[in-house]
Image: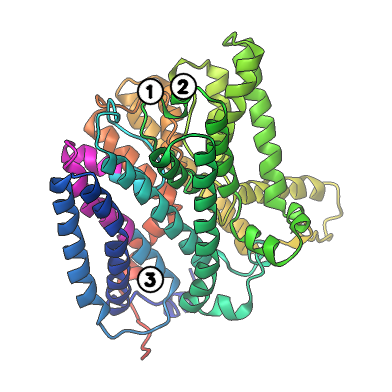
Amino acid sequence: MGKQSIELSYAIRLRVIGKYFGQLSLVVAFLTLAPLAVALFTAEFAIALRYGVVIAVLSGSGIFLARIRAARRVQANEAMVLAATTFLVIPLVMSYPMMGSGLSFGDALFEAISAVTTTGLSTLATVEDKPLVFHFARSWMQWYGGLGILILSLALLLRPGITAKSLAVTEDIRDDLVGGTKVYARNILVIYVALTCLGIFILLLAGSGFFNAVVYSLSAVSTGGFAPHDASLGHFSSGLIPWITILTCFACALPLLLYYQGWREKWKELFRDLQLRALIFIALAMSLILSACLYFFMHQPWQQALYHGPLIALSAQSTAGFTTLNLGELDAGSKLVLITSMAIGGGIGSTAGGIKVLRLLILLRLVQLSLVKTCLPAHAVLDQRLGGKHLEEGEIRQALLFFILFFAAVTASWFLFLICGYDPLDSLFDVVSATGTVGLSSGVVGPNLPGILKTALSVNMLLGRLEIMAWLVMLYPRTWFGLRVEES
């Protein structure tokens, strides 16, 4: 890094972090009223008391911090530190009421991290003996965790380039991190709530029952995957409820602002979106390949193969984590197909995790351009375009960087599992699932998992949800020490 770049870099301002963290604490306190109400309604008064304590702590600290006088404009590094801090604090405080359902602190923390990161992995032997408020709280945390990461991605990822152009981000919005985020947050909130209500309504029509409709819809819209049944969607003998749930997951693996654009413009214009077309193509391909694996290698009847294959493939692609089969019994080929789907994930600007389809397309385009360049004169200049839009150098660099960081995180955790003697393919499956915030498991994650591996997976879930860079910013010395912007 050049001397001039270092001189122009600015450390975070603690007043800004404190003020906005206080405001977020008040928001989380307000959101915690929902599980409190469920606990009171179901007469789980001991758990309700724990939620009351959490609300009091968050409200008290939030009111105090929100009164700090600080600058309105937020730097990118401040937004990342704020996001990372929030995703650390929420699981810690929500572990306390979860322990009221009979969990140890370690298991409660793992469940809370899995919930707020919209992952859906669980170390519990069974969840069907837990109170209703426990199931609602997990899905509710997934729901607002998914909403939070959407708003963060809109604030930090929509910079000049192909993503910003596809979502019609203006210069004014890019210039104001807080104001621009508020503009998009309102649109996202409307879409998010509408999709949730639609999911609940359709599941009710399908005969799921009210509680199941609410819990499954909250988890589906956030592409979370927590279910109140040990068999997940395999609990339902009807083929309609699993399809409704999985299609809801897939709908939310698309950039949600596409729905806003479709409502304002013509819906048929949406199919020109590069991420949508690529995601549909990849999902169909993975569904067919997985169905073929189930038919040829698992010897399932073709009707069953064509039922379970697309459902599980779409669940993996949308990084939802719902399943209709015991994945530990799958053949190696099927597991590799799902690992690939989980690693790719959904679209940027969606609730899905993974590498993201747009980044994959950028890298594939970069490979293609490199091959084309070998056939051109040395002085020829190639226009780096994808889907008719120009690719910025920063976008290419970020895509490459995220690929490296994603697989570095996977490799480090996988190495720990191998040292502990776990099956290589099964442990890779669960590590990719955690890093991609998916929630599918081959059976490695369970009550007997050693504490060090639970910690590793918890770190993977947090890294994957905030796409790693936020945590690197937290560890970067110049984030904390150096010049600070003086702004009233």
Camera-side residue of 212 and 14: 212
Q: Is residue 319 visible?
A: no
From the viewer's perspective, is residue 338 above or below residue 409?
above
Q: Looking at the picture, which amino acid does disc 3 mark? A: Glu
Query: Which residue is outermost to the top?
Result: 299
- Asked whether residue 330 is in view, the answer is yes
Q: Which residue is mark 3?
A: 78
Mark 2 and mark 3 in contact (Cβ < 8 Å)? no
Residue toward you, 207 or 212: 207
SS at badge 2: helix
- Coordinates of residue 384 in the picture (x, y in percent): 75, 59
3 or 2: tag closer to the N-terminus: 3
For the residues labelled 3 and 2, the Cα–Cα distance comes to 41 Å
Label 1 close to label 3 by CB (< 8 Å): no
Q: In terms of sequence position, does the residue under pointer 1 or pointer 2 come before the other?
A: 2
Is disc 1 in contact with disc 2, using a CB cutoff of under 8 Å?
Answer: yes
